Image: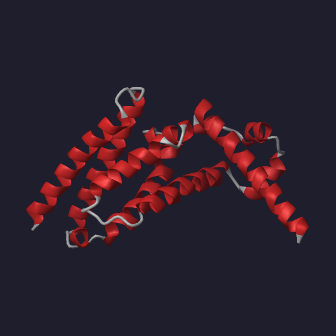
Amino acid sequence: MQVSQYQDLRVQRTINSIYDAFKRLICEKEYSKITVTELAKMAQINKKTFYRYYPTLDDLLIELQTRYSQAYLKEIGNLQYPRDLAKSVEAFFTYSATQGEAYERITTCSVGSYVGIRQQMINEVMTKTWGQSQEFNQLADWKQRILLDFVEQTGLKVYTTWVATGKEESLEAVISAATELMQGGVERFLKLEQ
């Protein structure tokens, strides 16, 4: 029994080393330029050990983004949409502001390997949040899509702009501006539908 607990601890340390090295590499270079060889060297493991846990770098990236989305979903899991949109916006910015540079690079990237996998993460969050809203579910499919696109793109663009400008404005000011913009648009859109 003690051996398996020790083994589990070793496995967790190895995975944490892989994650730490991967995040550092994401901050240093484009995803397409990251190799398993340099990741393994930075994590102080051999390539065979990496492949024991992850068939490809894409699998590692998917797992990392899944961790991000699951942690965020825990924070907003009890919110009701559209009623709690302001709380959701605040939670997104507060959560994002604490995740570090690798998260920022993945989230703000507009082209390349992160975009497709990031979109899967966003779709999961949107489905698990807005998909529970009675008002949302009463909309025609095309109106559901444009509402989700508006919420997703507005929040993401405001966050991307804030990061790109060196976070000059306070987090509170950015949350306030994003909330006003998003809540105003969503409320007006839903009123027009009633």
Model colouring:
secondary structure
Q: Position of residue 19 (x, y in %)?
A: 68, 46
Q: Position of residue 83 (x, y in %)?
A: 24, 62
Location of the C terminus (image quadrant): bottom left
Looking at this view, is 186 or 53 the one in front?
A: 186
Q: Let me know if residue 70 appears in the view.
A: yes
Q: Which residue is drawn at 84% across and 45% down?
A: 46
Note whether 129 is above or below 103 in the view shown.
Answer: below
Q: Where is residue 24 in the image (x, y as percent from the top left)?
A: 65, 36
User: Total marks drawn?
Assistant: 0
Q: In this view, does 147 lie to the left or right of 91?
A: left
Q: Let me know if residue 29 appears in the view.
A: no
Note whether 157 is above or below 90 in the view shown.
Answer: above
Note whether 118 is above or below 37 in the view shown.
Answer: below
Location of the N terminus (image quadrant): bottom right
Q: Is residue 81 left or right of residue 3?
A: left
Q: Quadrant of residue 54?
A: bottom right
Q: Residue at x 12, y 55 (%)?
A: 188
Q: Which residue is drawn at 77% across and 39% down?
A: 37
Query: In this view, which residue lies farthest toward the right?
Result: 3
